[in-house]
Structures are given as structure tokens and as C-alpha cells.
């Protein structure tokens, strides 16, 4: 990493994030979302990405490489959405960190509305995103994505809900 002033580092982070966000939010979710998502991640995320997804739903957790996060989180998540459009609400950049607020309005693979608000904290080094911390409404994920009624009362029986959501998605076919 080259030595940059704080202002230069902030500007590099802003350029990286602006490019990434423009590409990420340019098209609505649809049948090609998984392939498009893979290409975006390969272009903007460092191979040794650390991705933290906070929550109690099945794919929440810590991923310690871009490939692991794609395989275990991003690709399955995109497969559980039928339609949707992500829009940027706010971008705050300071040094090598960026905070981004998005909202996604869409429909899950099981046909339920999915109107989610996200907050992401990104770390950027040498023009690549090296760390992501994702915060979202996990209750909405349980109910709209996995079809669970009152998941807290059910003790977050996510494994069964995941299997059922996948079976339902397979029965309904591609979006």
C-alpha cells in the first residue's frame, strides 16, 4: 500500500465505492443476478475479503475469503430473491472506510415482499474492498425469505426453513 494523505485515501475510497455502487445498483435483480453478482464481486472485492453478516438467519456469519462468501452467502442469497431493485440512500467516506445505507424493494423466491434496509461498513485498500460488515433486519429475512411465522417464538428453526425455501424455489423454477 502506498503512503497517501488522509484526503488522498478518502478520495481513493470514494472512487472505488462509487464505481462498485454504480455497478451493483445499476440493474434490478432477475434471472441473471447470480452471474452478475459473481462478476461484480470478482471485479471489486479482494480475494482475501473478510465479510461479516450479522444476524441469526442461516447464511449469517463470518466469511474469510471472497470465494467462501460468494459460495456460502452471496450466491445462495441471490438465488432466494425473485425480483428486486437496490437503491443507494447514503454514502459516507473517511479514509479507507465507507458507510453505505441501501434499501432493496423486491419479491423473494417464495413470493413474499422483501423491503429491506441495509447498513454496510466497507474497508478499501489499493482500490479493492477488503472488509464488509453487513447489518440488516434479520426478522424480515426469516419471514419473507424463509417463510417463517414468528421466528423468535419458533426458536429460529432455520435449517428446516432453508430446506423448505429451497424446495419451494425449485418447484417454482427460475424467475
Image: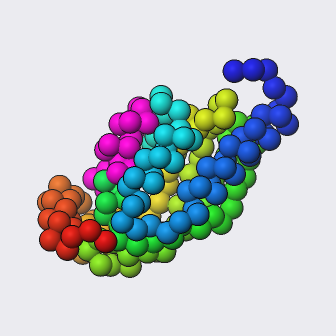
Q: At 31% across and 60% down in the image, what residue appears?
A: 79
Q: Is residue 51 magenta?
A: no
* Location of the N terminus (image quadrant): top right
* Location of the C terminus (image quadrant): bottom left
Picture coordinates of residue 45 (x, y %)? 53, 38
Q: Is residue 151 left or right of residue 164?
A: right
Residue 95 lies, with reference to residue 32, above or below; the image says above
Picture coordinates of residue 21 (x, y %)? 62, 55
Quarter of the view holding residue 156 = bottom left
Quarter of the view holding residue 147 = bottom left
Q: At 26% across and 74% down in the image, what residue appears?
A: 110
Q: Is residue 62 magenta?
A: yes
Q: Using the rendered image of the protein, determine whether residue 53 is visible from the camera's viewpoint.
A: no
Q: Nearer the viewer, residue 36 or 82?
A: 36
Question: What range is drawn magenta here?
Answer: 55-75
Residue 90 lies, with reference to residue 95, above or below; the image says below
Q: At 58% across and 38% down in the image, what residue appears?
A: 129
Q: At 57% across and 41% down in the image, what residue appears?
A: 44
The colouring scheme, among rainbow, by chain, secondary structure or one colour, is rainbow
Q: Is residue 143 left or right of residue 16?
A: left
Q: Nearer the viewer, residue 122 or 87?
A: 87
Q: Nearer the viewer, residue 28 or 99?
A: 28
Picture coordinates of residue 140 (x, y %)? 38, 69
Q: Using the rendered image of the protein, determine whether residue 13 is visible from the camera's viewpoint.
A: yes
Q: Nearer the viewer, residue 156 or 30?
A: 30
Amino acid at each position: 500500500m502506498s503512503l497517501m494523505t488522509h484526503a488522498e485515501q478518502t478520495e481513493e475510497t470514494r472512487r472505488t465505492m462509487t464505481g462498485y455502487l454504480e455497478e451493483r445498483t445499476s440493474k434490478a435483480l432477475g434471472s441473471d443476478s447470480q452471474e452478475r453478482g459473481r462478476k461484480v464481486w470478482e471485479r471489486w472485492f479482494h480475494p482475501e475479503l473478510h465479510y461479516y453478516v450479522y444476524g441469526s438467519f442461516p447464511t449469517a456469519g463470518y466469511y474469510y475469503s471472497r470465494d467462501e462468501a460468494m459460495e456460502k452467502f452471496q450466491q445462495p442469497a441471490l438465488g432466494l430473491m425473485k425480483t428486486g431493485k437496490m437503491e443507494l440512500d447514503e454514502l459516507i467516506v473517511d479514509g479507507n472506510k465507507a458507510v453505505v445505507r441501501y434499501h432493496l424493494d423486491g419479491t423473494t423466491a417464495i413470493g413474499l415482499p422483501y423491503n429491506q434496509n441495509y447498513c454496510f461498513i466497507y474497508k478499501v485498500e489499493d482500490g479493492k474492498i477488503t472488509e464488509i460488515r453487513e447489518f440488516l433486519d434479520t426478522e424480515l429475512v426469516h419471514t419473507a425469505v424463509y417463510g417463517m411465522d414468528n421466528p423468535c417464538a419458533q426458536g429460529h428453526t432455520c435449517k428446516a426453513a432453508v430446506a423448505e425455501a429451497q424446495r419451494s424455489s425449485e418447484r417454482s423454477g427460475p424467475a
